[in-house]
Image (spheres, rainbow, N blue to C red):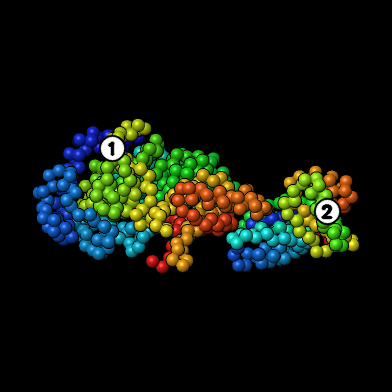
Amino acid sequence: MVWDKKYECMEKEELEKVQLNRLKETVRLAYERIPFYRKALCDNGLSPDDITSLDRLLDLPLTTKEDLRQYYPYGMLAVQLSEIVEIHASSGTTGTPTVVAYTRGDIDLWSEVMARTIACTGATSEDIVQNAYGYGLFTGGLGFHYGALRLGATVVPMSSGGTKRQIRLMRDFGSTVLTCTPSYALYMAEIAADMGIDPSKSTLRIGIFGAEPWTHGMRVQIEKVWGLIACDIYGLSEIIGPGVAVECPAKDGLHLWADHFLPEIIDPETGERVSEGQDGELVLTTLTKRAMPLIRYRTGDITNITFEPCKGCGRTAPRISKIKGRTDDMLIIRGVNVFPSQIESVLMEIAEVEPYYQLLVSRARGLDELEVCVEVKERFFSDQIGRLEVLREKIQTEIESVLGLTAKVRLVEPKTIQRSEGKAKRVIDKRAL
Amino acid sequence: MSVRQISVFLENRSGRLSEVARILGDEGINIRALSLADTSDFGILRLIVNEPDKAYQILKDANFVINKTRVLAAEVEDRPGGLARLLGIFESADVNVEYMYAVVEKATENAVMIIRVEDIEGATSLLRRAGIRLLGEKEVYSL
């Protein structure tokens, strides 16, 4: 269902007009109210009046997470604290949390983009949304909550954790939409099976999964085990929380709500823009947020963008690819760039192992070593060392062909790799860098 | 004529093997024979116990990865050349022995070997024709 036809299906030229008008307002607001941005513009010899086209954005400096930390907690606010109605902090996946704040208008905006997002996956006001994203400082829980309320659906505010209870209530309430991290969705299926409940017979029809990168293979697995359509959602607390982009059931890229969030893709090394369709780091400028407008914020997420209208749903909202990794979880092992998602995609293709893995990086005598721990599936356990060795070699060869790097594969017992109710911790880097 | 063997997948972590032994001991399971095959990362513990079904269940409940396999328990003469004769029978029939290990206790003057081959039925008749005595479950468990 298209929630806001005018903006979701707007012609590109018209969208650019909307974006330019909104960009002008945002830059003026930031310039007038936030010393950080006033200085940034002045240092580049610019004033808000210079923003006469969208291309002038290139003259503006990039904003980083470090900048937000430096102005902790209220230094990036464009409004008086009395106008702030809600404060969140980023989940701190990669370090000190960063603070984000919302005016009443911002909460309204958030509800609106999240209603769009949830509707885009095919959910309607008839659905029962079991929201298993964490409620609290993390924006996932409340973002979905506001969006589902705006959509008019029924929200079950489960938050994350209490897995057995999640599964019992899912069955009792007849939840039709599940929202959580993809790794938690898999974990829930495992626990359901342990409880003697067949997850594929659940009432769920749609899953909206995000907050961590996941692969196509993981999607196939989740869809199969739960019998639902799994859509990827993208967002980050600095920009608004969840509600920046989402897949429609065609699952051919995530529709990014570019009337509110202006996307660019840059080369993370040089900061130069890359052309349409090329991979790079996503940079976002908020166009309508009041409390904490951000100009050219570096998300750290690697993706690419297309402006072709979607063949599946007809929306013209540009689409970004599934996030391929983060500039900061990219491992450099013996000079080779490695994203955990690449290893995940290999493992998902191998029937004999569980979809859980952990990467251990260490350095012995100056040489980096990558060890991949994988759980053997119980039904594939053979009492012959030879067969397990063959399996191990198969995984090793596959990883080598994808990464161009030899990794040590270690087979571990099922259920020994830590399960996660939120973001899965998949990399342990023991190198003292 | 075969006996049930339980195999356990063990990560190469300290205390894993002793945990298996402790769990079985606590439940009064007696280990009749065992072998441990290992690589640098993991091992496979193979067990012949007096109550295989019970042992299977308690190890499963303790979250070990296990499976049940059928193996042969064959008597060999306890003298030089006894084992060579047994293996010679397999060799001349072109039967591949996947693994084998010895049982410590003896029922008679002869030693007992646990043998795993792909085709248990075929190997049973092969050994019988060669005059090798095979032990049944009851006999092995009560050694």
Q: Chain of mark 2?
A: B
Residue appearing at x 15%, y 43% in the figure: A53
Question: Which residue occupies the foreground of this view, A347 or A285?
Answer: A347
Q: Which residue is mark 2?
A: B86
- Quarter containing the N terminus of chain A: top left
Q: Secondary structure at mark 1?
A: loop
Provide residue A206's location: percent of width, then percent of height: 44, 40
| Left or right of A344 in this view: A321 | left
Question: Which residue occupies the foreground of this view, A101 or A312?
Answer: A312
| Left or right of A106 in this view: A195 | right
Q: Which residue is mark 1?
A: A307
Residue appearing at x 47%, y 58% in the figure: A370
Label at residue A323: none
Marks 2, 1: nearer the viewer: 2
**Do badges 2 and 1 share one subunit?**
no
- Using a 10 Å C-alpha cutoff, classify the residue at mark 2 as few (fewer than 14 neighbours), some (14 to 19) or many (20 or more): some
Q: Looking at the picture, which amino acid does disc 2 mark?
A: Leu
Question: Which residue occupies the foreground of this view, A297 or A72?
Answer: A297
Residue appearing at x 29%, y 54% in the figure: A269
- Using a 10 Å C-alpha cutoff, classify the residue at mark 1 as few (fewer than 14 neighbours), some (14 to 19) or many (20 or more): some
Q: Chain of mark 1?
A: A
Residue appearing at x 16%, y 51% in the figure: A59
Question: Which residue occupies the foreground of this view, A394 or B25?
Answer: A394
Q: Are marks 2 and 1 in contact (CB under 8 Å)?
A: no
| Left or right of B65 in this view: A173 | left
- Quarter containing the C terminus of chain A: bottom left
Q: Looking at the picture, which amino acid does disc 1 mark?
A: Phe
Provide residue A393's location: percent of width, then percent of height: 56, 51
Real-space Cα distance between discs 2 and 1?
Answer: 74 Å
Q: Secondary structure at mark 2?
A: helix
